[in-house]
């Protein structure tokens, strides 16, 4: 079931969504063996920013029908901390292919970065280019441009320009993680391709809000410390399917599909509408081994056909 | 059983419910967990195998984090109060049903410092990790337990050498468990406090122990999606300005690491 993706060989098509799996914390909870049989065929880091970020004040999560809203705020050690401390410890993660035999394979590392200016983004991408441990770079463009105030990823012209300015900063595969909070997502995907992206990934979480439970007439206030957050889980699966299908139709580059995938059947739907890989996020919160379970289910379906 | 945290399997395990007993206002749910190990203060992420979702407001969706109240080596026990769609479903579990479990997780309590007596302070359904802790400490480890009323105070039957407080005065001291703690520390201040309960109670314990310079280990609760450090949802601010993840940096956190214990009442449960 191994798959080729932008020049990389993956053991199977299931990877993690950025910011939904912490390999270090998982190793502590589940033992060192986790890194020798990693649930995913590639490991996408949480979003790395130039400066360290503490993240949003709690509360950060809220359960909704068939899903959750998170407002985590991209906590990370900053670029220097990531490169010095985390990246060396991530090298050497392996997974098992789900072909008969299931031999061990290296898990390519994808580093997800976010910057609020083209200069910041360039510095992040150039730093990734210099590190052999990093197999590919994913741009989180669901972030306001501090110069224009617009979400970089929501405006096709801006997105094309930003990706275009970065393109020559790395020879590694450049993946653009699209925001679903845009008027015309396929137009944004096409703009990313025109800017030079090697692949696009979608969907990111949908902007959402929850109110704190009110007691005897107190004024409504947002529950999440960050006021709004991102909706994920099976609640967004049908939205993801529509957006992935529309994007795959519009672009010629590979598409990583994600959004509410809980089973091999859900993954297959995204593959059938044109995704090359499928990412799992929220389901890993409910089932830490969801990545490899879904890869196995997908393989079983293919064998049965 | 040891004090060192036991490691969980990343694969969800299906554990069979062997009993669901009423304990006043609470339920004590027992599940088969043969060969299981668990340090006091560790917890499980639990979801019913069937009927998880489609309840009130089409929830629950996420598994629920529950302290292991007791582990016999063959069975794990959980103390439950119906306070939301997830805990309601778990309270309704029938013998023979199964739960999906990821456990044991987190860092539990540490051994008391030499020369200090352990003093257990619990509130409401939060007494759960103190039950397994008292099992571990053995002997006569005093437990100060506070409840809203007499029905909830029935959970004190799970422990020995209990001094009770209730809000309505129906059993034991009328008032807070923090008042009992103050009295205990007046009598003998050479103690190490182990506490678990609602946020405001833990904050009272933290502040008192800080004033009296008594070490305290607090088992915290926070809205949590995953339980193993993936979601970064369950953070609490530490004294040094960092955020700690309750699931992997805790749930037991030294009181000296915190300036304040927040209140998460109202979180999906």
Image (cartoon, grey):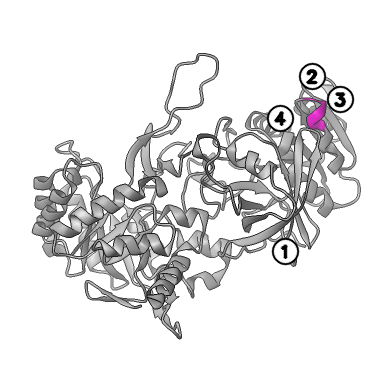
Marking on residue B168? 2
Cα separation between marks 2 and 3: 8 Å
On screen, residue B95 above or below A130 = above
Cα separation between marks 3 and 4: 24 Å
Task: Choose mark 1 or mark 4, whichever is in front.
Answer: 1
Tag 4 near tag 2, CB within 8 Å = no
Q: Residue A182 at what x, y percent from top left?
A: 20, 42
Residue B213 on the magenta span: no
Task: Choose mark 4 or mark 2, whichever is in front.
Answer: 2
Q: Which element carries disc 1, helix, strand or loop?
A: loop
Residue B81 position by quadrant: top right
Residue depicted at 30% across the width and 51% down the height: A240
Q: Earlier in the sequence, mark 3 or mark 4?
A: 3
Label 4: which residue?
B208
Marking on residue B36? 1
Q: Earlier in the sequence, mark 4 or mark 2?
A: 2
On screen, residue B170 above or below A244 = above
Residue B152 on the magenta span: yes
Q: Earlier in the sequence, mark 3 or mark 1?
A: 1
**For the residue carrying disc 4, how many other residues have a C-alpha within 10 Å: few (<14), some (14-19), or many (20+)?**
some
Residue stretch rendered in magenta on the structure: B149-153
Label 3: which residue?
B171
Q: Which element carries disc 2, helix, strand or loop?
A: loop
**For the residue carrying disc 1, how many other residues have a C-alpha within 10 Å: few (<14), some (14-19), or many (20+)?**
some
Query: Does the rendering let one see residue A93?
Result: no
Query: Does the rendering let one see residue B121?
Result: yes
């Amino acid at each position: 079931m191994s798959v080729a993706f932008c020049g990389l060989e993956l053991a199977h098509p299931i990877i993690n969504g950025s910011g939904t799996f912490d390999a270090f914390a998982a190793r502590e909870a589940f033992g060192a063996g986790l890194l020798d049989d990693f649930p995913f065929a590639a490991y996408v880091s949480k979003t790395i920013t130039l400066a360290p970020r503490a993240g949003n004040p709690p509360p950060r999560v809220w359960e909704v029908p068939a899903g959750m809203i998170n407002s985590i705020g991209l906590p990370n050690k900053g670029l220097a901390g990531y490169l010095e401390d985390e990246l060396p410890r991530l090298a050497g993660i392996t997974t098992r292919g789900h072909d008969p035999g299931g031999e061990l394979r290296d898990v390519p590392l994808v580093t997800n970065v976010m910057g609020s200016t083209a200069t910041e983004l360039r510095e992040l991408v150039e730093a990734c280019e210099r590190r052999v441990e990093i197999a590919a770079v994913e741009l989180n463009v669901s972030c306001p441009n501090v110069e224009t105030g617009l979400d970089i990823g929501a405006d096709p012209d801006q997105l094309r320009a930003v990706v275009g300015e970065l393109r020559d900063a790395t020879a590694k595969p450049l993946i653009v993680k699209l925001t679903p909070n845009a008027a015309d997502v396929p137009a944004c995907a096409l703009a990313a391709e025109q800017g030079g992206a090697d692949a696009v990934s979608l969907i990111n979480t949908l902007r959402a809000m929850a109110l704190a439970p009110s007691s005897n007439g107190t004024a409504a206030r947002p529950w999440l410390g960050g006021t709004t957050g991102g909706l994920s889980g099976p609640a967004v699966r049908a939205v993801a399917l529509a957006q992935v299908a529309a994007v795959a139709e519009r672009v010629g580059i590979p598409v990583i599909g994600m959004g509410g995938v809980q089973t091999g059947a859900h993954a297959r739907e995204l593959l059938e509408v044109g995704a090359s890989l499928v990412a799992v996020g929220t389901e890993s919160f409910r089932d830490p081994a969801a990545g490899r379970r879904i890869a196995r289910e997908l393989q079983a379906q293919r064998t049965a056909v | 059983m040891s004090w060192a945290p036991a490691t969980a399997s990343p694969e969800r395990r299906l554990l069979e419910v062997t009993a669901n007993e009423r304990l006043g206002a609470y339920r004590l749910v027992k599940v088969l967990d043969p060969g299981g190990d668990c340090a006091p203060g560790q917890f499980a992420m639990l979801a019913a195998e069937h009927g998880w979702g489609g309840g009130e407001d089409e929830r629950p969706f996420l598994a629920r984090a529950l302290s292991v109240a007791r582990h016999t080596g063959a069975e794990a026990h959980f103390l439950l109060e119906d306070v939301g769609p997830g805990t309601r479903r778990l309270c309704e579990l029938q013998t023979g049903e199964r739960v999906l479990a990821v456990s044991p997780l987190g860092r539990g309590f540490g051994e008391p410092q030499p020369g200090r007596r352990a003093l257990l302070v619990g509130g409401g359904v939060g007494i759960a990790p103190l039950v397994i802790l008292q099992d571990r400490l053995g002997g006569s480890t005093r437990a100060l337990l506070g409840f809203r009323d007499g029905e909830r105070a029935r959970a004190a039957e799970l422990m020995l050498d209990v001094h009770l407080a209730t809000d309505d005065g129906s059993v034991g001291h009328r008032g807070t468990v923090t008042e009992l703690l103050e009295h205990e520390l007046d009598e003998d201040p050479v103690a190490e406090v182990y506490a678990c309960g609602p946020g405001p109670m833990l904050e009272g314990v933290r502040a008192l122990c800080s004033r009296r310079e008594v070490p305290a280990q607090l088992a915290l609760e926070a809205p949590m999606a995953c339980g193993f450090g993936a979601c970064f949802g369950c953070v609490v601010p530490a004294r040094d300005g960092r955020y700690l993840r309750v699931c992997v940096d805790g749930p037991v956190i030294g009181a000296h690491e915190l300036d304040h214990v927040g209140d998460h009442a109202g979180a999906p449960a």
